[in-house]
Image (tube, grey):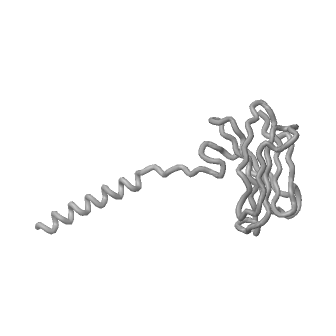
Amino acid sequence: MRSRGTLAILAGTMMFSTWLVAGAAPASAAGPCGSGYNLVGSYAIPASGARTGTIEVYYSSGSGKNCAIAEGSGSNYGTKNYKVVGISVSGASSWTGYDSGLYSYYAGPVYVSAPGKCIDLLGGVGSPSRTVRKVHCG
């Protein structure tokens, strides 16, 4: 009798513990730009032909900033090679945010605040690059 009571208590404890673990809310993972940024656009690198990468654009309504990365695609993802990303308010004389180097996954993140304006983007993986002008206006 004593062992049945002990087994019942252990089984109840295990079920309660399982419920606690299973019921816990998962932690939200932050993307490459940090928490609060949502993907709002992506552009193939280069614009046509064999894709070497992607320019990804994120926006945070909390900070009011745009963020960009240039990520390798296919064999360029996880392979250390030259990657570059730039972001600016459209028409600026230089990139507000710019990052380049030998990276395995992506260049960036880079940021710009452009309330009520459009942004320009630059992205490159290996030798092909792409510039996208006057996008994500707002």
The image shows residue 130 at horizontal and vertical percentages of 86, 53
- Nearest the viewer among 137 and 113 is 113
Rendering quarter of residue 124 = bottom right
The image shows residue 19 at horizontal and vertical percentages of 36, 54
The image shows residue 135 at horizontal and vertical percentages of 82, 40
Figure check: 114 above or below 51:
above
Q: Is residue 89 left or right of residue 21?
A: right
- Residue lying at 87% horizontally and 60% vertically, measured from the top left: 128
Rendering quarter of residue 67 = top right
Quarter of the N terminus within the rendering: bottom left
Figure check: 80 above or below 55:
below
Figure check: 34 above or below 116:
below
Figure check: 68 above or below 83:
above
> In this view, which residue lies farthest toward the left?
1
Rendering quarter of residue 49 = bottom right
- Nearest the viewer among 125 and 42 is 125
The image shows residue 116 at horizontal and vertical percentages of 77, 30
- Residue lying at 80% horizontally and 33% vertically, measured from the top left: 117
Quarter of the C terminus within the rendering: top right
- Residue lying at 75% horizontally and 61% vertically, measured from the top left: 72
